[in-house]
Image: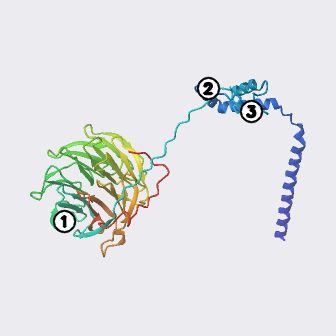
Amino acid sequence: MVQHVNDVDRHSVHTLVFRSLKRTHDVFLKNTGLLPPVDTTLYKKLKSIKARDTYGHIVDKVKSQPIAQPVPSNNNAEPPPPGVEASIETQNDTALVPVSIPGVTSVVSTPNYTKTVAMPVKKSPLVLKPKWHAPWKLYRVISGHLGWVRCCAIEPGNEIFATGAGDRIIKIWDLASGNLKISLTGHISTVRGLAFSHRHPYLFSCGEDKQVKCWDLEYNKVIRHYHGHLSAVYSMALHPTIDVLTTAGRDSTARVWDMRTKANVHTLVGHTNTVGAVISQAAEPQIITGSHDATIRLWDLASGKSQATLTHHKKSVRALCLHPTYYMFASGAPDNIRTWKCPQGKFIQSLPGHNALINCLAVNADGVLVSGADNGSMHLWDFRTGYNFQRLCPPVQPGSMDSEAGIFSATFDMSGSRLIITGADKTIKLFKECDDATEESHPVNWKPEIIRRRKF
């Protein structure tokens, strides 16, 4: 019974609404004839004023153009009807659109002159073709550390390399054979950064124990300590021409040290979170830092002040690398990889596709950029064009967990022909180019974008 009453009520409401709408429609339909008549003259004036307001500046530009050379008239052509020429000229002075007149095939303002506008010539967009690179392959795996291998550094003579790990030990290996030469103990926590001096037989190390040490490789012992950091030290870089060391870490600062006197020359303050990466070069800007506050800062070494702050990244910047020949550098973050041009830090292009947390970047003189991620993936790019020509996922050490597949450091040797990868599976992996690869066997599968960012 209740269901029947509800159906009746719903039907009644729909009927009332329909009748109300019909009554309203009929009322407006009857009152249409009571509207005032449309004045055609006023309507035309309204349209002309509106057109003049919208396109008037274009007409002024056309009138301001220089008059072209006279066009020879055709004497055989029939003259226009009397009065038509004057009306055409008058019409073109005031109207925005030429009006067609019966009996006239072409409409011009004057019989011997034409008005032209020089349009700018559009250049075709710059499209860079990527250089062909041979694919890289794994050829050696070195085991020896008992913890995550966090950092790696190559000796300038290209004979040995050093690695630091979570087992608090620095190990020095022979690059050619992969044999262990010596183990250095002294840190009391994870070793996070290593750097060989190009001017002295020194090895510098930093770690999560807030310590920065200088090792004399002739005696294999620590000869200097650099005290000042308030928390873990995550990255370090040596200046290529002067005896200056830069370290950065979790206290949101980067500190510049005099290598010999152990003095803290500058404390680079400005970041609001952990400084995860620092690089140094001889030209301006001499120091570049990347932080977990998603910014990159360019510093002047003389004044110790920030020259520019790059805020393009949206997530933490954990990796930076300098190109050995171009005056450029690259930065890696979980959102994407970006390349920049010094000295102003001008943004060049993004390298999307490596959708992971980027821990390390490395580039050689041939233009091969390597990015290693926290999920164990490794991408190889053409630095100039941003073309991703190879993607690898190196096998993890047997017996390690799948979660321990992260890549923490990537380093090219001095020749650029060997790549050293360290990761969470406690191993060191060495890669080299495939000798038998050709452009026919591994073609460039390149799909250019419509418009590139800018050339450099």
Residue 333: x percent and y percent?
Answer: 39, 54
Question: Residue 231, position in %: x, y?
Answer: 27, 53
Residue 99 tag number: 3
Viewer can see residue 423: no
Q: CA gap, disc 2 to disc 3?
A: 23 Å
Residue 370 occupies quadrant: bottom left
Local crowd size for mark 1, using a 10 Å CA cut-off: few (<14), some (14–19), many (≥20): few
First in sequence: mark 1 vs mark 2: 2
Tell us which disc is closer to us: 1 or 2. 2
Q: Residue at coordinates 69% horizontally, 31% vertically from top-left?
A: 96
Image quadrant holding the C terminus, namely: top left
Q: Which amino acid does label 1 sit on?
A: Ala
The residue singled out by tag 1 in the image is 176
Q: Nearer the viewer, mark 2 or mark 3?
A: 2
Which numbered disc, 3 or 1, marks the residue that appears first in the sequence? 3
Image coordinates for residue 41, horizontal then vertical, percent: 81, 29
Which disc is residue 70 wearing?
2
- Dot 2 or dot 3: first in sequence order is 2
Quarter assignment of residue 347: top left
